[in-house]
Amino acid sequence: MEYDLIIIGGGCAGYPAAVYAARFNLKTVIIAKEPGGLITTTHLVENFPGFISLTGQELADKLEAHAKANNVPIENDIVSSIEKQDNLFIVKTSIKKQEYKTKTVILATGTKHKHLDAPGEEKFSAKGVSYCASCDGPLYKNKVVGIVGGSDGASKEAMVLAKNSSKVYMFVRTNLKAEPINATRIKALSNVEIVEGVEVKEICGEQFVTHVILNNEQKVDLEGLFIAIGHVPQNELAKQLNVNLNEKGEIIIDRLSKTSVDGVMAAGDVTDMPWKQGVIGSAEGSVAAYSAFEYINKNFK
């Protein structure tokens, strides 16, 4: 199977890229391990233009529907390898064992949750340790939970937990760094206690989490701990292509979403754009499709 463009990743960057690729009449396919990406785990999105308020899953569904309306096929598969041979890219998948050839590639692979790497984190994964409040928060109805992190994202997660849990501890390493509107909201919640200047040293329990130990040796009893300390770029495929990365492992792109490798574009949270937002990823994906179109016109006549 040969394509003009393969988009790896289906989320806020990948789906808009597909819409524009279709408008440029490029033969395109999306290959996505997790359709929708991490935005699907977001409880509430209120900053995507055109939608006053909706869940992350609803936004992802709308973006996916838009791509499908432009007749772009979506393969739920995992890209295991990618290499450049002459003027084409060879893309192989691990689930359906498919091999594709394409003239251009857009890496919209996003990020994955960063781990705390504290003793007990791996042991109690899915046994009290979680990374998604909207996914697992309802399991802790009327229970005491904690969340590690002081970012705006962590604050939003804490607000989700506060809807179900009787008590929510926010363990913040330095100080709360939420956007002003969310800082006001979180501080107004009577069942949220912000504990600044601490780190979770150890996660403890027997079969399930029962408490944590902080770096000041304080013991805090709780039944669930949510980790919200950021994300790690999913750059494995970029490394296979020897694409330039920054010190954080993010793909370096220019204003046209081009990488250091001709024919390879990137968009969304996997790139070196410091402000990670769905709307920015959508713009980058759209620009990446334009760059793919321009590249093909220049190099394939």
Image: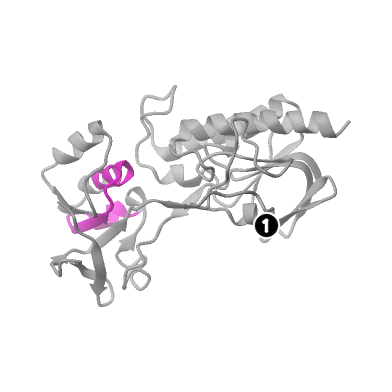
Query: Furthest-front residue in view?
Result: 247
Secondary structure beneath label 1: helix
Residue furthest to the top in view is 50
Q: Give whichever of 139, 287 is nearer the camera.
A: 287
Instruction: Name which quarter of the figure residue 213 lies in.
Output: bottom left
Residue 260 lies, with reference to residue 49, above or below; the image says: below
Q: Is residue 77 visible?
A: no
The residue carrying pointer 1 sits among few (fewer than 14), some (14 to 19) or many (20 or more) residues within 10 Å by Cα, namely: few
Is residue 49 inside the magenta stretch?
Answer: no
Count the marks: 1
Q: What is the span of residues highlighted in magenta in the rendered image?
A: 136-159
| 238 vs 70, nearest the viewer | 238
Left or right of 117 on screen, residue 278: right
The reply to whether residue 264 is visible in this rendering is yes
Q: Residue at x 75, y 56 (%)?
A: 98
**Residue 29: percent from left, percent from top:** 70, 41
Q: Which residue ends up furthest to the right in the rendered image?
A: 301
Q: Which residue is mark 1?
A: 240
Answer whether residue 158 is magenta in the image: yes
Residue at 62% of width from left, 29% of height from top? 287
Q: Position of residue 265 (x, y in %)?
A: 66, 39
Quadrant where the C terminus sits is: top right
On the picture, is 282 further left or further right than 264?
left
Q: Amino acid at mark 1?
A: Gln
